[in-house]
Amino acid sequence: MHRYYNIYQFPVKEDLLDISFDEFGGITSVPPLRVNVRTLNEEDSSSKKSNSHDESTNLATIRFNEVYAQTNFIYNVWETEENQLRLLLSQWNQEHLADTLLAEKVYVSTLKIINRHHMQRLLKKFDMGTEILFEQNLEKWRESIGRPLLPSCDTSIPPCTPTLSEIIRPLTSVSATNSREGSSLNSAINTISISLREILNETPRGKMLVEFYSQFSRFQEEQRTSLISLIAHYFEEKNLKMTLSASYKMENEILEIFPSEKLEYFRTSKRGRIYNKYANLTQSFKNAVSKHIRNDEREVIKNTRHEKSFEPEANGEICLNSLKFDNLSAEEFDRTWKACSHFRLEFIKSNKSIIEVFEKWPFYKTPSGYRLIDIDFRIAFNNRNGLLSEWSQNVEKITLFLTTEQHIKDRNIKGMLAHIKNNDALSENGKYAALIWAIHGFLVPTNKVVKKDLTGKKITTKFTIKDSQESVIYLGSNQQQVEEYISHLKKTKVWQPAIYATGKDIFSIENIFVQFGETRYEFTSILSALDICFKIIFLFDLKFPEESIMFYTFIESYFYKFKPSHNYAKVHILSEFLST
């Protein structure tokens, strides 16, 4: 407790109270305070000076607001509300505010119920530093009397300007009521409820700007430019998307927090200086760096195919550790794998990076990892297995469709279909692989892709039938050619599964395997390889290859009975023919 020794004189009727505080712990002290009380009469004051101190002094006990004296009188030390207020302000070393508060009829009783938004109006004639100190003193005092100051404006009062101390004080939460904008997935991911107060509080430059304003009560153009740059860099570094509405929100918060600022300082165009600064930052980085570097974080759109909700098993981590460290038999491994399926599928569903999925569940990368993909696909998508179960009964119909009514115009594919019809000695893999390639002759890719080369020049690419075929099954004359092709793709394409094989032609296909990133699964059946390719795409929620979107949409809707992610008239025509 701080100790003070002060002399207070209060006029009481014709007499004068001379009160010496032996110990004063503050106006809110609870323990009794010892005081010396003596009454002095003007007529005999000089004669009484010769008397002993003990004869002219009565000992009393004082509590807050009252004096209990050992005389016949009870004096109210705090006789007026003005005295109460002045004494309180003196303890805060802000006595100079007394006249202003009294002029506004603000007393101690008023300070007990005052809200933050009143203070700026009350102290508008004073500098920002005085306002901050007053608010700090008021907060401590209100807490000591059990009536803490509310952190924000009273909701029953119209919206008000936040005080500067709200900026400086660390923020504990961000309002959850701010709605997220944008209907696209990118907008939904990047739009976050962010406030200027949070930016100022979290960054060193933000705190310096606040301190500058508290001292000078205004910004010059140099500080405004720094503030704009601070906001734009914060959004870029946090990977937040700056929308027009977000920039407008920042502008309005600037006007609220720094009242001397004007909208014209920041809204020099429709977009405004904040939005333009952010756009310039992101564009300059793309021009300098991004376009030259392949993105290894193969980000994919999530939650588009996994419609089911998965409740993770409570022992999911235990199962995962058992899979990693216990010496399990094949049967025990499969049983443990299935026992934590929902734990794993929920992780896959919520995770945006296939790399992270494979790091947590490295068993997918083993040579037999395709079995685990098949297990998880069946659990996630209700045992759909249409390609393997329905392909053979549709082979003749597909062949018939492709060879009639001029559905195929490509000469090479026409020759391929003729060879299928006239050669009963073809192997199953050769026949099925050729028919898969032939389907691309009807589902000819129509989409165009615009990309930029290293110089920034835009290049429009229209995919061919061969592009579509080889994005599903690539056939090399030997293994070296296949490996060189895969190495080339790794430099330019994201992770997408595809089938690779060798042979002098598609009918003599052999050495079949599926390559997915750095993982390779070997197969003896071309149909099983295609089945796993599709299941990889669906399970890990990847995009269909751009070259063969129409082909995979056909497989998706007809064989696996999913609602197609894209609508194509030719897919509908072929599916309708096969269904009759």
Image (cartoon, grey):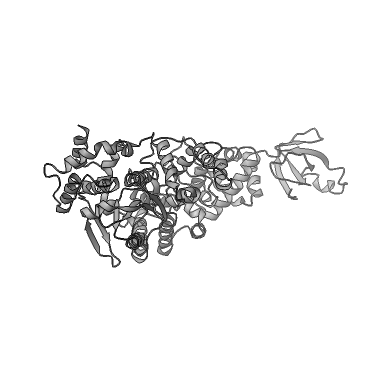
Q: Quick one: which residue is furthest to the left in this view?
A: 405
- Of residue 291 and residue 99, the one placed in the foreground of this image is 291
Residue 579 picture location, percent across and down: 22, 33
Q: Is residue 262 above or below residue 114?
A: below
Q: Quadrant of residue 332?
A: top right
- Of residue 397 and residue 88, the one placed in the foreground of this image is 397
**Residue at left offset 61%, top offset 41%:** 142
Residue 164 visible, this orientation: yes
Residue 305 picture location, percent across and down: 36, 40
Q: Is residue 222 above or below residue 78?
A: below
The quadrant of the picture occupied by the C terminus is top left
Q: In the image, 495: left or right of 450?
A: right
Q: Quadrant of residue 78?
A: top right
Q: In the image, 437: left or right of 288?
A: left
- Of residue 372 and residue 243, the one placed in the foreground of this image is 372
Residue 146 picture location, percent across and down: 64, 37
How many marks on residues? 0
Residue 565 visible, this orientation: no
